[in-house]
Image (spheres, rainbow, N blue to C red):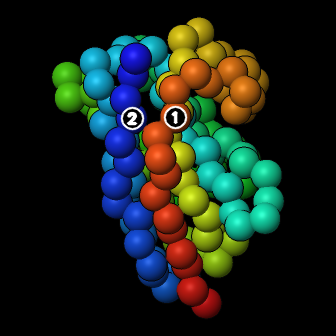
């Protein structure tokens, strides 16, 4: 059983930055960040394979960077130039063999999920 613990959420003004952290319990496979705005579907944000290959949703390219530290089983999500549309609950997810092509976008393929951390961006 893989446990994922997110932290780093909060409230910021538009244009600000936040860094989210996800710590996994001894896991080396694909890890990703998803977000779910209130009343909307969950959507992929970024993914990182065990080999440190990164994947980004088109909506966040250029503003968000995912970094992975395999020694500490941690994935960071550095978010810059935040917009009110980035307001959502952000979830860390993990699953094997997913970080390839467009598979990483499919939330149903991930087996492990964290509890989420809220990000609120005000205008």
- Residue furthest out toward the left: 71
- Residue furthest out toward the right: 40
- Please rate how many residues cluster around mark 1, counting C-alpha atoms within 10 Å: few if below 14, some from 14 to 19, many from 20: many
Q: Indicate whether 75 appears above or below 35.
A: above
Quadrant in which the C terminus is drawn: bottom right
Q: In the rendered view, does 7 fall on the left or right side of 58?
A: left
Q: Secondary structure at mark 1?
A: strand
Measuring from the top left, give residue 23's x and y in whole percent: 31, 37
- Please rate how many residues cluster around mark 2, counting C-alpha atoms within 10 Å: few if below 14, some from 14 to 19, many from 20: many
Residue at 45%, 80% in the rendered image: 12
Measuring from the top left, give residue 64's x and y in whole percent: 52, 53
Q: Secondary structure at mark 2?
A: strand
59 or 1: nearer the viewer = 1
Quadrant for residue 24, please give it. top left
Which disc number belongs to residue 113? Answer: 1
Residue at 54%, 75% in the rendered image: 120
Measuring from the top left, give residue 116's x and y in whole percent: 49, 51
Which disc number belongs to residue 104? Answer: none
Measuring from the top left, give residue 39's x and y in whole percent: 78, 65
- Residue furthest out toward the front: 1
Residue at 45%, 15% in the rendered image: 29
Instruction: Measure the alpha-carbon separation of dots 1 and 2.
Output: 6 Å
- Earlier in the chain: of badge 1 and badge 2, it is 2
Residue at 72%, 48% in the rendered image: 42
Q: Is residue 34 visible?
A: yes
Q: Mark 2 highlights which residue? A: 4
Quadrant in which the N terminus is drawn: top left
Q: Is residue 78 visible?
A: no
Q: Indicate whether 81 appears above or below 107.
A: below
Do the numbered discs 1 and 2 sit on residues whose CB atoms are within 8 Å? Answer: yes
- Residue furthest out toward the top: 97
């Amino acid at each position: 059983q893989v446990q994922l613990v997110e932290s780093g959420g909060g409230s910021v003004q538009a244009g600000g930055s936040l860094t989210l952290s996800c710590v996994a319990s001894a896991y080396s496979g694909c890890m990703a960040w998803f977000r779910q705005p209130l009343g909307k579907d969950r959507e992929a944000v970024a993914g990182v394979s065990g080999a440190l290959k990164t994947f980004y949703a088109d909506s966040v390219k250029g503003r968000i960077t995912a970094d992975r530290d395999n020694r500490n089983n941690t994935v960071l999500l550095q978010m810059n130039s935040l917009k009110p549309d980035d307001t959502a609950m952000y979830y860390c997810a993990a699953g094997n063999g997913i970080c390839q092509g467009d598979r990483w976008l499919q939330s149903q393929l991930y087996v492990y999920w964290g509890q989420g951390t809220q990000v609120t961006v005000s205008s």
